[in-house]
Image: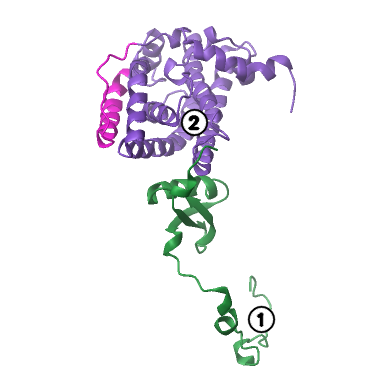
Chain colours: A green, B purple
Amino acid sequence: MESNESQWPLWEVFTQEDGGAPHEHAGSVHAPDAEIALQNARDVYGRRGRVVSVWVVPSNEITASQSEWAGPFFDPGADKAYRHPQFYKIPRGLKGF
Amino acid sequence: MSDNLFQYVLRLGDDRLVLGHRLSEWCGHGPILEEDIALANIALDLIGQATLYLKLAGETEGKGRSEDDLAYFRDAIDYRNVQLVELAKGDYAFTIIRQFLFDVFSYHVLEQLQSSKHKELAGIAAKGFKEVRYHVRHSSEWVLRMGDGTEESHTRAQNALNELWRFTGEMFEADDIDRAMVREGIGADVEGIKPKWEAVVTDVINRATLSIPSDPPAMTGGRRGRHTESLGHMLSEMQIVARSHPGAQW
């Protein structure tokens, strides 16, 4: 490709499928602005399947945690049993749990 | 009547087949990956539409020709597309400006054909209309960005418009076939569509800071089989596999 892709900002793409599902991260596209980012997202991620809505957001607007924080940030607290209420009995007949 | 219908549906199919093939030539050569995918999607839409029209044309003709027979075993002189769609793809600005000029035309034609008295034609048009609404959005947004973009993109877009303008008149020429189809409530009224097309195109061109060329849109003949040399070159590439291996299945 004869491209100067580096000049176009990156956008993160979130797609929603029908049935009221949440918007989920699908991937990213390059685009010069929001309208073209939406069109590109539609072409790259929305054309197959059952997508009913797309969000695009400039990648540099996302604030991310850093990998070295992983310990203190995400320590699951495995010693505190009440955070993991797995001992409840799930009623029979309850599906999709 | 059925010969008029055959010719009419053939024109609809040929416009879309030829333009779809021209767009498909960008596959792997797009200016950027995302746009490469977008153009390939639009090419597939157009070729898909062409398949349905050519299938209907073959059935209307009643001589047992399939959509593949019509696409691969006719020479340029038997093609009925407007010359606008057959011109070599040029640079990206040329491709987008041409696409925009045709998309707006196609939008209005298919919008009318959805209520054609010919039920099958109406159904094919309704499916295509949904796709063309997106095509118009895609091409007009790019016209705006190229016209009102950098000095280079503006110059290229204006050059493309200058070169293409004289090919636009042919889309709105109505001959006996068109008039018969309109009379029977089957076809679209291209003469009536012209002012609508002009209004949309002028609006987008102005907003893109481009200017409508002053030379008259004089080129014509495609509907009667008179084509530019570009079509012959394109068909020789498009048809070579089918002609070298007739009846091959894959």
Q: Nearer the viewer, residue B35 or B56?
A: B35
Residue B14 at x, y percent in the picture: 51, 19
Residue B51 at x, y percent in the picture: 57, 25
Read off the residue under disc 2: B123
Q: Give the range drawn in magenta.
A: B191-218
**Left or right position of B164 against B2:** left
Read off the residue under disc 1: A91
Q: Mark 1 lies on which chain?
A: A
Does the magenta run of residues contain B122?
no
Q: Which of B105 and B38 is in front in this view?
A: B38
Residue at 46% across, 18% down: B87
Q: Please tell me whether mark 2 sits on a helix, a strand or a loop.
A: helix
Residue type at tag 2: Gly
- Prevailing SS of the magenta stretch: helix
Mark 2, Cα crowd under 10 Å, few <14 / some 14-19 / many 20+, is some
Quadrant in the picture for the C terminus of chain B = top right
Q: Please tell me whether mark 1 sits on a helix, a strand or a loop.
A: loop
